[in-house]
Image (tube, helix red, strand yellow):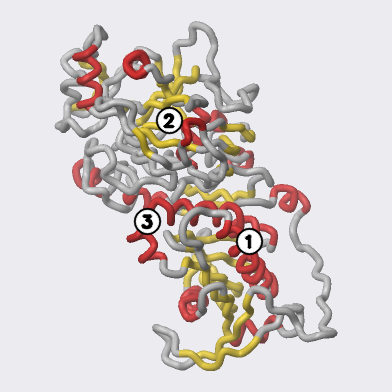
Amino acid sequence: MAVRRVAAVLAADVVGYTRRMAEDELTTLRQLGELRQSVLYPAIARAEGRVFKEMGDGLLAEFASVVSAVECGHAIQSQVPAAARDSQGEPLQLRIGIHFGEVVAEGDDLFGETVNMAARIEAAAGPGEVWLSEQARQMVGNRTALAITSQGAHNLKGFADPAELFAVRAGDTAPPGASRPQRRSRANPRNLALAGVVLAAAIGGVVVRFALAPDHTSVDTAASLPSGLRHGEVFRDCDECPQMVAVAGGELLMGAPEEGIASGLFPPEQGPQRLVDIAPFAVAQREVTRAEFSTFLDASDHQRPTGCRTWEDGTSAIREDRSFDDPGFPQEEDHPAVCISWHDARAFADWLARKTGEPYRLLTEAEWEFVARAGADTRFSFGADPDEVCAFDNVADATARSRWDGWETALCSDGRVFTGPVGSYDANPFGVFDIYGNVREWVQDCWHQTFAGAPVTGEAWTTPGCDLRVVRGGSWDSKPSIISSSHRGRLPADHRDFLYGFRVARDLNAD
């Protein structure tokens, strides 16, 4: 049900985002991810704000207090230059707009003229600036020590009358003698203890957000990696080998938050959440393809996989006439290999290790989630909205629903029903493709019902003789309600299924 109320809305975006993406997409995405984690989310959480929408180049946040919104905007712009200096490539710059007025709240999203006005003011601001509307300026009054100066009347797109706008630039101070009043925190002490980045997840199409612990996922991109590699650098050890991406270590806030599990949004096996240390490693940029797996079969004595669980004629069953060679739907050589057991995937990694002399293996469960999050603690590396997943992954979408009526699908369309060529969609900020879709992926770990007692380092959690192994990610038939960085499942190690494939990892050895 839609509810009307008043709020201060802050809009922020990256200056020259389209140009930067065209010139160096990977660096731009990495820088923006780092900025969100190091500056934007913490500043908004400290100011008791709430991110209600994320876009590719920015975000929208809500504040109960206009003063909080203005001081948060100033804090963000004050911190951006230092954060930008620490990042590789052309430094990012932000512009911020703030408006106060009536909003329409539906679920966890906000709509209406106030949201639109904040976005238009942001577009009028210059690099590194915070601009606000006349209404917001009046509400602030003299309740802040920041200097706020008029920028005159501006014509804003979509609004008939010129609007007087005001600016607060990073580094501005109030006139001598101005005092800064103390403000009493309205936050619940428990929320303050949890304040940090914001996790966004969706249930029934409504975005729900939970505060996370102060520690959160971070990537040490400045660290020097073994073998002289840089974070995000792509390499290949042999002509037949998968293309690998070097991943810097860091910290992973692994699993789903307690509040999300308690509410039923996430199942108990995705918790308890814990902080995990991740050492540098390399991950396959793409899922292992049919062509790569065929090369392995031809060059080794591994038995060709036969028998596969498929869904055909309205039933799901293991069919002996289905296999890696014929999974029951058309595939090309650049599609991911399916109908692959954990043992098959492990044999492929062992073959690569023998062939190259390098320590190839399957990803650990912690490493998989670290790659999936790519520095973010939101539901996806690209934000919170599952209907944006089609830009990044092949999942159950409007294309699938047109074939199978009644499926729960994302509202977007990726144009495919079954698997597609690996790397067909946008890479995540680490430069890795297809992490949430195309096929679900085997990892090294044995299945444990929860993370209670799990290692706090990135190694695999195994027990002698375990049969159930962990699978991660989503596939071409995954419904949006289950897709997330924390989603996990289990299967017997000898099980073959037309939804499941894998990618490999390798240790980075010191020279």
- Label placed on residue 116: none
On the image, the x and y values in percent for residue 261 come to 58, 38
| Callout count | 3
Q: Earlier in the sequence, mark 1 or mark 2?
A: 1
The image quarter containing residue 438 is top left
Whether residue 278 is visible, yes or no, is yes
Q: Residue at x 65, y 67 (%)?
A: 78
Instruction: Say which element carries label 3.
Output: loop
Q: How crowded is the residue under tag 2: few (<14 C-alpha within 10 Å), some, or many (20+)?
A: many
Q: Residue at x 21, y 20 (%)?
A: 295
Mark 3 or mark 1, whichever is nearer to me: 3
Q: Earlier in the sequence, mark 3 or mark 1?
A: 3
Q: Which residue is mark 2?
A: 472
Q: Is residue 422 above or below residue 301?
A: below
Q: Residue at x 68, y 61 (%)?
A: 48
Amino acid type of the residue tagged 1 in the rendering = Ile
Mark 3 in CB contact with mark 1 (< 8 angstroms): no
| Distance between the alpha carbons at the discs numbered 2 and 3 | 30 Å
Q: Nearer the viewer, residue 361 or 52?
A: 361
Q: Is residue 233 above or below residue 202?
A: above
Q: Which residue is mark 3?
A: 24
On the image, the x and y values in percent for residue 29 come to 43, 53
Q: Which residue is mark 1?
A: 44
Q: Is residue 315 above or below residue 419?
A: above
Q: Earlier in the sequence, mark 2 or mark 3?
A: 3
Q: How crowded is the residue under tag 1: few (<14 C-alpha within 10 Å), some, or many (20+)?
A: many
Mark 1 in CB contact with mark 2 (< 8 angstroms): no
Amino acid type of the residue tagged 3 in the rendering = Asp
